[in-house]
Image: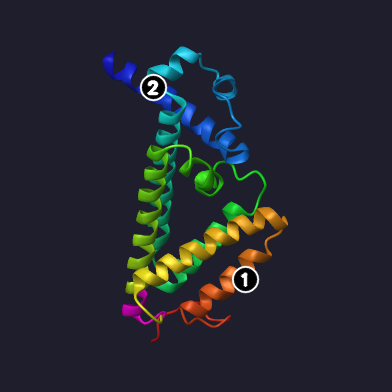
Amino acid sequence: MAKAHTNDSSDVRDNILAVGQRIMSGKGFSAVGLNEILTAAKVPKGSFYHYFGSKDAFGEALLSNYFEEYLAELDGVMAQPGASTAQRLLQYFDMWRDNQSFLDCQGKCLAVKLAAEVADLSEAMRAVLDTGTAAIIARLAGAIERGVGDGSLDIDGEPRQVAESLYQLWLGASIMVKIVRGTAPFDAAMAVTRRMLHLDQTASGAAPA
């Protein structure tokens, strides 16, 4: 019975986080009240405070959960069989474009939506953002280094520097997409990405035979 109760508790917490992620990805952190989340999640306020001590603590957990899922998805892309490292990197950025190209991103754009807002509101949330983005950049740097090693791409500079530049490039493009209400910034970001990885516009990133 205790195990079933634990699973039920985990389900409730996960449901609150999933609903909060979807709503806050669309409206931001400050604009969303707890009542809106709890009504959509169909749980009483007491249940919320059982799992989260405050709205800021909820935001911290929300971002931690988001990055955990994001990194797992990134790891999956980078482990795709039958592809060169360059192909996997291009697939990752294609996935980024797909996830960020819609007004309702279904929670997949949480970090982009909240980064500037919550970094000034909460040191705890800023720290989670810092840790999460650093982990993404580290994985990109590792992939770039492997790509140089397998000959599917080439770079000017160190893998870490290139990874940071690429992440910042795509983060900026995500913001511009929201401003211009079109995907042209992603097209430009992909063109720059290919140049930085020394891939021409028609290359698939295949390793040389």
Residue at horizontal 50%, vertical 81%?
199
- The spot of residue 62 in percent (x, y) is 44, 36
Residue 153 in the magenta stretch? The answer is: yes
Which span is picked out in magenta?
146-154
Q: How many marks?
A: 2
> Most extreme residue toward the bottom, as rendered?
209
Relative to 92, 138 lies left or right: left
Q: Earlier in the sequence, mark 1 or mark 2?
A: 2
Can you identify the residue that label 1 sits on? Answer: 188
Compared to 182, does 43 lie above or below? above
Q: Amino acid at mark 2?
A: Tyr
Q: Amino acid at mark 1?
A: Ala
Residue at horizontal 41%, vertical 72%?
162
Compared to 66, does 42 lie above or below? above
- The spot of residue 184 in percent (x, y) is 68, 65
- The spot of residue 131 in percent (x, y) is 35, 49
Residue at horizontal 64%, vertical 54%?
101
Can you identify the residue that label 2 sits on? Answer: 51
Alpha carbons under labels 1 and 2: distance apart: 43 Å
